[in-house]
Image (cartoon, grey):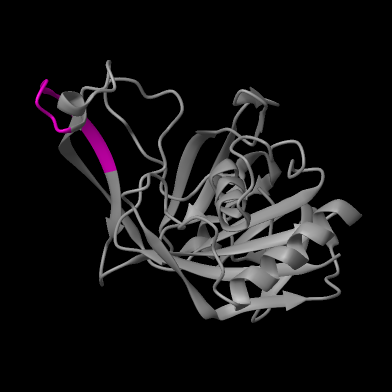
């Protein structure tokens, strides 16, 4: 199994909660499908053509928070595009005021995330190698963003690395493991408060794990726990784990 990792940063982000309507609420970190869309943008794959190729049984995805995020609710005026003509595109037919929740850094200038991608079959391995080639040569077919197109982002070239042979282990939940990524709550068997002193543990709810063609949600939604400051969590998990450095492990989304 090959493991590709890279760090992505941006001044602001928005990962729309699929169930939000009038007000566009945001998750704190990119859902799995946002990462899959990012891969599709870099490689120039046709929109929504990659959900089956990159489903969670073919490609493992994990996320580590690098910079502590915060949420800010702002008002934006969207163009009224019921008719695609010059007047609408220039805003001359009126605007649609909308509340939107943005992700900003709690400190510093940018929010940041570390992305881990693990191939689980020959097809995803081939795609991972192509993605690695594009990343090291800064060849992006479409720009990368942390959500919408206006949340432009950049990938730190020095952070891009490929591990040819990555060993996946299994934790049975009997021993506390140092975890450095977001974790599906269903995989957490126990949390010891004494082991969490000084940590800022948070819960993010209802992230869709997989889409099918037409963006239909597959396998329901999942809740995740994470450490908002980007620090490791010492918790009991029952799942596949893989090393992410400094003695800590990651869990696939």
| Residue at the extreme right of the image, as rendered | 122
Name which residue lies at 21% across and 22% down: 80
245 over 203 or under it: above or below = below
Name which residue lies at 50% across and 55% down: 142
> Relative to 131, is 112 on the left or the right?
left
87 over 7 or under it: above or below = above
**What's drawn in magenta, residue-wise?**
90-101
Name which residue lies at 67% across and 39% down: 186
Is any atom of residue 105 visible in this view?
yes
Name which residue lies at 33% across and 34% down: 25
- In the image, is residue 64 part of the stretch drawn in magenta? no
Q: How many marks?
A: 0
> Relative to 109, is 62 on the left or the right?
right
Using the image as rendered, state which of residue 251 and residue 114 is in the foreground. Answer: 114
Is any atom of residue 175 visible in this view?
no
> Relative to 168, is 202 on the left or the right?
left
Report x, y in % for residue 183.
61, 50
Report x, y in % for residue 37.
57, 46
Q: Quadrant of the N terminus?
A: bottom right
Using the image as rendered, state which of residue 122 and residue 82 is in the foreground. Answer: 82
Report x, y in % for residue 8.
47, 66
Report x, y in % for residue 12.
30, 56
> Relative to 10, is 96 on the left or the right?
left
């Amino acid at each position: 199994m090959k493991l590709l990792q890279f760090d992505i940063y941006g001044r602001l982000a928005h990962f729309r909660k699929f169930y939000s309507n009038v007000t566009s609420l945001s998750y704190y970190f990119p859902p799995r499908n946002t990462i899959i869309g990012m891969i599709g943008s870099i490689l120039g794959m046709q929109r929504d053509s990659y959900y089956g190729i990159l489903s969670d049984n073919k490609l493992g995805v994990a996320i580590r928070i690098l910079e502590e995020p915060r949420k800010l609710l702002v008002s934006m005026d969207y163009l009224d595009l019921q008719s695609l003509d010059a007047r609408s595109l220039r805003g001359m037919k009126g605007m649609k005021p909308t509340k939107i929740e943005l992700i900003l850094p709690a400190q510093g200038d940018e929010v940041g995330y570390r992305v881990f991608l693990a191939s689980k079959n020959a097809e995803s391995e081939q795609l991972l190698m192509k993605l690695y080639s594009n990343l090291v040569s800064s060849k992006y077919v479409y720009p990368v963003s942390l959500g919408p197109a206006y949340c432009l982002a950049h990938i730190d070239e020095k952070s891009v690395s490929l591990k040819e042979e990555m060993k996946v282990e299994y934790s049975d939940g009997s021993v506390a493991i140092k975890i450095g990524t977001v974790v599906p709550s269903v995989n957490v068997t126990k949390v010891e408060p004494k082991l969490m002193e000084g940590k800022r543990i948070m819960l993010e709810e209802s992230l869709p794990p997989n889409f099918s063609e037409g963006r239909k949600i597959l396998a329901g939604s999942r809740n995740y726990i994470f450490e908002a400051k980007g620090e490791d969590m010492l918790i009991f998990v029952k799942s596949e784990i893989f090393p992410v450095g400094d003695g800590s492990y990651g869990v696939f989304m």
